[in-house]
Amino acid sequence: MNKLFLLFFYLIITYCVICQENNSSFDFYGKSNYQIEDSLKYTYSMILDDLTYLYANYSEWVHPVEVGKSEFGLELATIRIGYEKPKKCCVFIVGNIHAREDYSSKLVMKFLNVFLLNITNQDNTYPKAKQFLDSVDIYIMPVANPDGLKIAQLDFLGIEDSFNLYRDKILLIDTYQEWKANGKGIDLNATFNDGNHHLKHGGNFQSVPCSEGYKGLFPAEPKETQAIQNFIFKIKPLVTVSFHTKGNVIYWADKGTHKYFKEIDTKINKKVSIVSKLALTSISKYPKVYGCGLENYIRSKYHLIASCVELDSPNGGRIQSPDNEFNLRVWNKVFLAPYIYIENAILYKKEITEIAIH
Ligand SMILES: [Zn+2]
């Protein structure tokens, strides 16, 4: 009798363990090949692990691409989604250029995973996902500022020795969790070489290395900026989308460059705005304020479409809203935004290619 009871007990426990394991992998609408953590802190090493998982599970569609390294030697991990042979035309999706804005890397990674589910017929959130790859490749860089992300998450493993060389020379505003710059205290999105570096003097301007607001001594000073600029030169994306996390708005046009785009920039960003309920800003007027962002650089240097998308509403502080509110605040609202940008890059491929400087 005792033996029978023990056997029964063992079977019940085994069943529960199996159920739990299955549940932990059924995170996205019950799909088993979904991997991305979307409600807890999502670290740089988790992102690298997830990229490795995605290479392994979607090797036909996911191709690693070398872009370069951060100041402290971390990989600017990037992948190309597409057929084995790279295509001439592409879209570029970037997250986490600002350290403390890790909703943006989470959005980019979740989009990547769900897009792959759609290519492989495991989900229908993005019905034309596979069809898109007949026209363009999609390059995805989830973390443009890995040193900064690690600092903002108090995750110093692997960068401690390098960071200690600079830490005391960098002005810290509030705490490390509010860090926005790269590891050497330069705001990467104030360093791109769009011809405005000498003018740039934004609202939170700092004249010395700082956790935010310092533009560096010369354009493209940080290694991250150089690597990304070289990459843009190589791939010349029809459309670039750089995700940030404050404001619920899209910065989509500058006074100095809007005229190049024959209203194609207006049409594309309006569609994204309607679908995602993110407001369009007015056309940015002053290079002193808008200059030297990745999006401004691409518009001015190559006459290609580039947008800066600010996810989430302002919360009165520097620190982003809690990780467990990501789905509510961001994903449920903005999950179609990258898809619409890709769809319209394809729709306007001919016109954008004609406008672009090659
Ligand atoms: Zn930002």
Image: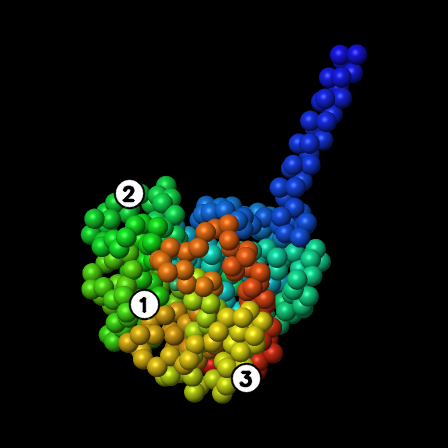
- The residue depicted at 32 percent of the width and 67 percent of the height is 190
Residue 195 position within the rendered picture, expressed as x and y whole percent measured from the top left: 30, 77
- Label whose residue precedes the other's in the sequence (1 or 2): 2
Compared to residue 347, the image places residue 28 above or below, namely above
Q: Is residue 83 left or right of residue 145?
A: right
Callouts 3 and 1 close, C-beta under 8 Å = no
- In the picture of the structure, the residue carrying the numbered disc 3 is 351
Give the number of the mark in front: 1 or 2: 1
Picture quadrant where residue 117 is located: bottom right
- The residue depicted at 44 percent of the width and 55 percent of the height is 321
Callouts 1 and 2 close, C-beta under 8 Å = no
Q: CA distance from mark 3 to mark 1?
A: 29 Å
Question: Which quarter of the rendered image does ligand 1 occupy?
Answer: bottom left
Q: Amino acid at mark 3?
A: Glu
- In the picture of the structure, the residue carrying the numbered disc 2 is 161
- In the picture of the structure, the residue carrying the numbered disc 1 is 190
Compared to residue 138, the image places residue 7 above or below, namely above
Q: Is residue 106 left or right of residue 162?
A: right
Picture quadrant where residue 81 is located: bottom right
For the residue carrying disc 2, how many other residues have a C-alpha within 10 Å: few (<14), some (14-19), or many (20+)?
few
Q: Secondary structure at mark 3?
A: helix
Using the rendered image of the protein, determine whether residue 210 is visible from the camera's viewpoint.
yes
Q: Nearer the viewer, residue 2 or 144?
A: 2
Q: Secondary structure at mark 2?
A: helix
- The residue depicted at 36 percent of the width and 83 percent of the height is 256
Q: Secondary structure at mark 1?
A: helix
Position of the C terminus by quadrant: bottom left
